[in-house]
């Protein structure tokens, strides 16, 4: 029987959605649009809303997890999971486009 909290699955699903959107747009721009003859603009179009939304969700999860962890006198594994997951979502979605070589990052 698993001992992990449901927050781990929730945070994992949020991170997977954000990374799938960025990765899918990268794949489209890199391979499909070149094959079809379209200009590669999808990643630069969806990047600001996806990264801003994911970063905002990451900050909210970190804040909520910290408060939950503190209210339970630093014993809640759910609060710790939300806190660490929020940090990971924030960091991954804001640094992944840089490592993919996106040229439209301000």
Image: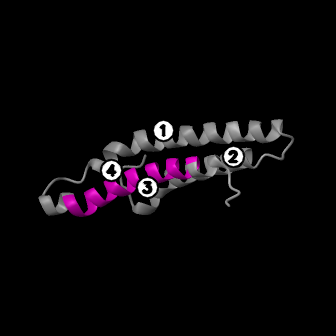
Residue pictured at 43% horizontal, 46% vertical: 106
User: In which quadrant of the rendered view does residue 100 lie?
Assistant: bottom left
* Residue 97 numbered tag: 3
Residue 84 got which mark?
none
Which of the marked residues, 2 or 1, is nearer the chain's N terminus?
1
Q: CA distance from mark 2 to mark 1?
A: 17 Å
Determine the secondary structure under disc 2.
Answer: helix
Sooner in the amino-acid sequence: mark 3 or mark 2: 2
Residue 82: x, y in percent? 66, 46
Magenta region, residue range:
10-32
Q: CA distance from mark 4 to mark 3?
A: 9 Å
Alpha carbons under labels 3 and 2: distance apart: 23 Å
Q: Secondary structure at mark 3?
A: helix
The answer to whether marks 4 and 3 mark residues whose Cβ atoms lie closer than 8 Å is yes
Q: Earlier in the sequence, mark 2 or mark 4?
A: 4
Q: Residue furthest left?
A: 37
Image quadrant holding the N terminus, namely bottom right
For mark 2, what is the residue?
Answer: 83
Which dot marks residue 53?
A: 1
The residue carrying pointer 3 sits among few (fewer than 14), some (14 to 19) or many (20 or more) residues within 10 Å by Cα, namely many
Q: Tell us which disc is closer to us: 2 or 1.
A: 2
For marks 2 and 4, give the one nearer the viewer.
2
Question: Compared with residue 1, is residue 12 higher up or lower down, i.e. above or below?
Answer: above
Give the residue at x 48% y 39%.
52
- Dot 3 and dot 2 residues touching (CB under 8 Å): no
* Mark 4 residue element: helix
Dot 4 or dot 3: first in sequence order is 4
Q: Label 3 to label 1, Cα distance in Å?
A: 14 Å
């Amino acid at each position: 029987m698993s001992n992990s909290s449901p927050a781990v699955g929730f945070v994992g699903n949020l991170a997977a959605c954000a990374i799938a959107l960025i990765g899918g747009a990268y794949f489209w721009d890199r391979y499909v649009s070149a094959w079809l003859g379209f200009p590669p603009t999808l990643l630069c179009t969806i990047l600001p809303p996806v990264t801003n939304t994911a970063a905002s969700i990451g900050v909210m999860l970190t804040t909520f997890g910290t408060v939950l962890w503190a209210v339970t006198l630093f014993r809640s594994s759910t609060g710790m999971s939300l806190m660490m997951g929020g940090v990971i979502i924030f960091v991954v979605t804001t640094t992944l486009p840089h490592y993919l070589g996106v040229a439209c990052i301000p």
